[in-house]
Image: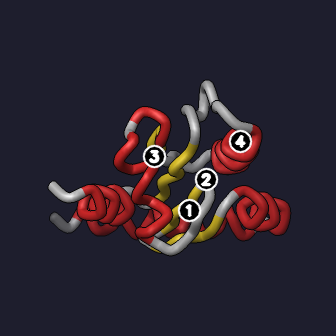
Amino acid sequence: MDVLDRIDQQVKNNPVVIYMKGTPQMPQCGFSSRAAEALGSTGVPFAFVNVLQDPEIFENLPRYADWPTFPQIYIDGELVGGCDITLEMHQSGDLKTMMEQAAAKADSGNSAA
């Protein structure tokens, strides 16, 4: 499978996904650490991809949504942004709301299947 197709499937099959350096438990950069911490503090489950373990994703993700840096956070299939935008949304309360809505939408879609 083409790497952009893999990324597309990850983005579309997870209500919330963060592409980060490292893991939420062991982040490998400060921006990834702060973004994952903000996501985790919402209490809403999220998926993650460690771009350091997948060189293809590391090299090609910036092309997927024309966003050059990591981390990249996708909610309900849409790029939200990186660390700064995620932290601003967390402070305003919008992050938790968006994550809850995406999770509820995914749950309702799964129960219909």
Percent from the top left, x then y, of residue 22?
Answer: 56, 33
Determine the secondary structure under disc 4. Answer: helix
C-alpha gap between disc 2 and disc 4: 15 Å
Q: Which residue is labeled 1 in the image?
A: 100
Image quarter where the C terminus lies is bottom left
Which label lies toward us, 3 or 1?
3
Q: Nearer the viewer, residue 54 or 85?
A: 54
- Amino acid at circle 3: Ala
Q: Which residue is labeled 2 in the image?
A: 70
Q: Could you tell me which residue is drawn at 70 percent across and 37 percent down?
A: 29
- Amino acid at circle 2: Phe
Please tell me the numbered disc located at residue 47: 3
Q: Which residue is labeled 4 in the image?
A: 37
Which label lies toward us, 2 or 3?
2
Q: In the rendered view, would you say 113 is above or below 10?
A: below
C-alpha gap between disc 4 and disc 3: 13 Å
Q: Which badge, 2 or 3, is on the more N-terminal residue? A: 3
Image quarter where the N terminus lies is bottom left
Q: Quadrant of residue 94?
A: bottom right
Determine the secondary structure under disc 2. Answer: loop
Determine the secondary structure under disc 3. Answer: strand
Q: Nearer the viewer, residue 100 or 87?
A: 87
Percent from the top left, x then y, of residue 2?
Answer: 20, 58
- Amino acid at circle 4: Glu
